[in-house]
Amino acid sequence: MTQVGLGRVDPSPAASPGDLDPLAPGQALAELHAGNHRFVTGVPRHPNQDAGHRAAVADGQHPFAVIVGCSDSRLAAEIIFDRGLGDLFVVRTAGHTVGPEVLGSVEYAVTVLGTPLVVVLGHDSCGAVQAARAAVSTGTAPVGHLRAVVDAVVPSLRRAAERGVEDINGIVDIHIAQTVEAMLADSFVLAAEVTAGRCAVVGMSYRLSAGGVRTVAAVPAGFAPAVAAAPAVPSAAAPAGQDGPTPPPGVTPATPAAPAAA
């Protein structure tokens, strides 16, 4: 994915989303960068975490950014970006994998709450990416629902292989960028909001040790991504002879152990 500038606007040190209402995508991105800088340099302000603000947002929310992040316990968005209650609409899954429920949550934030920025937040040494690479390497996928996480990451492994990228953090960057692309390809609602100039989508990678974030992919407001088709009506049953999802190339689903006799 080609990186495209978002016209970043740096707010004053004392600025907050409320002061800049309504926020443009570039302003929302600047708020995140400013908060992350405070976090990295050890001078967080912990905004919007007092009792007065808690009461103020009890009747409604107006988050300025959606964070679609990895579930890793070290990737707490409100801490990393030094934000508070009502600032961020956070959706987290292992490996920031995206399915219908995640897309529905993002669409709600963007269309109902008017959130102008969507961020896909990954991180170095991602366990989900490592698990997917191990599954492809050994030819055996994990059992249970963890397989769905691995299946979602495999396309990023293919792209990395095509580009000759073997370093785990290089693969993570590719997976972040591919997640951005997939969200826009699979959500015609989000794609329309971006095309209309009301929203931007950015992919960021977080460094676990240093605490900083960097942009690895960006689709600015007003850009016209590939238009996703409206969803088809799902079939009530799988086609004849098809009992479940087809394993990705090179991955054989493991067979779970038979239950013990009663």
Image: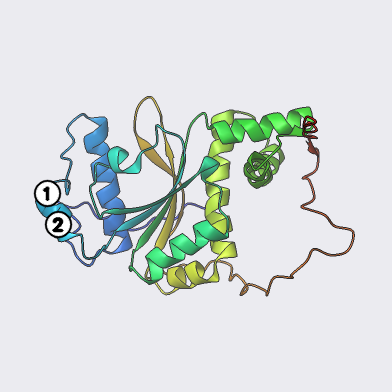
Q: Which residue is mark 2?
A: 55
Q: Quadrant of the C terminus?
A: top right
Q: Secondary structure at mark 2?
A: helix
Measured as percent of width and height from the top left, residue 121 is found at 44, 44
> Please, which residue is most extreme toward the top here?
209
Mark 1 and mark 2 in contact? Answer it, CB < 8 Å: yes
Q: Is residue 46 above or below residue 30?
A: above
Residue name at image x 41 percent, y 31 percent: 207
Pointer 2 local density, CA inside 10 Å: few below 14, some 14–19, many at least 20: few
Does residue 151 appear in this view? Answer: yes
Residue name at image x 48 percent, y 31 percent: 124
Judge from the rendering whether residue 243 lies leftward or rightward of residue 84; answer left or right: right
Residue name at image x 20 percent, y 57 percent: 17
Q: Is residue 15 above or below residue 24?
A: above
Q: Amino acid at mark 2?
A: Ala
> Please, which residue is most extreme toward the right here?
241
Q: Count of labels shown? A: 2
Q: CA distance from mark 1 to mark 2?
A: 6 Å
Residue 51 disc label: 1
Q: Quick one: 72 or 3, which is closer to the camera? A: 72
Does residue 1 appear in this view? Answer: no
Q: Is residue 254 above or below residue 217?
A: above
Residue name at image x 34 percent, y 64 percent: 116
